[in-house]
Image (tube, rainbow, N blue to C red):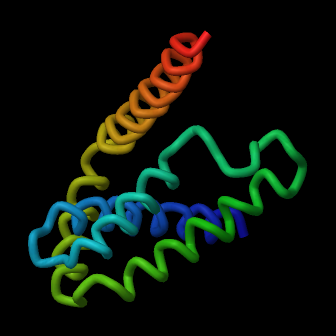
Amino acid sequence: MRTRLEERARALRTEAYALFLAYKDPRVPWYARAFAICVAAYAVSPVDLVPDFIPVLGYLDDAVLIPLGVHVALKMIPADVMAECRARARESLEGSRSAGRIAAAIVVLLWVLIVGAVVAATVGKM
């Protein structure tokens, strides 16, 4: 059972990366791009809607929201574009683990910038 679960997790990771690649493709409509990048960012983000330390619910949001987001995003992206992006994602992820780390670093940096901006705006009002 564990290997099947690992396979599904790996496939979901590939789909999330393919969504990121589709985001950069000019043939994808703007609304699909916006939704796809949100799903990909949430998939690699260390910040969750429900923190993982909360029993059951912490992992349930990842187990439900990410696959649901991927499914909806896939419906918005043209099939030929998605097929190309899946192939590129498989190639990239097979040879390197750095793509996930880079994406995670970008998301963490964005969160730090957002928190910094909120703190700066709050301190500025005092």
Percent x, y for residue 77?
A: 28, 82
Is residue 55 left or right of 70 when viewed as pictured? right
Q: From the viewer's perspective, is residue 31 above or below residue 66?
A: below
Residue 69 in percent (x, y) is at 52, 72
Q: Where residue 12 sits in the image (x, y, percent)?
A: 48, 67
Identify the residue shown where x is 75% and y is 50%.
Answer: 50
- Residue at 57% in and 38% down: 46
Picture coordinates of residue 55 (x, y %)? Answer: 90, 49
Looking at this view, name the residue that lies furthest to the left: 26
| Residue at 56% in and 73% down | 67
User: What residue lies at 38% left-to-right and 43% top-to-bottom?
Assistant: 100
The answer to whether 47 appears left or right of 19 in the picture is: right
Q: Is residue 108 left or right of residue 47?
A: left
- How many marks on residues? 0
Q: Quadrant of residue 85?
A: bottom left
* Residue sitting at the far right: 55
The vertical placement of 122 against 58, above or below, is: above
Q: Is residue 60 left or right of residue 102?
A: right
Quadrant including the C terminus:
top right
Q: Quadrant of the N terminus?
A: bottom right
Q: Is residue 24 above or below residue 112?
A: below
Q: Nearer the viewer, residue 11 or 67?
A: 67
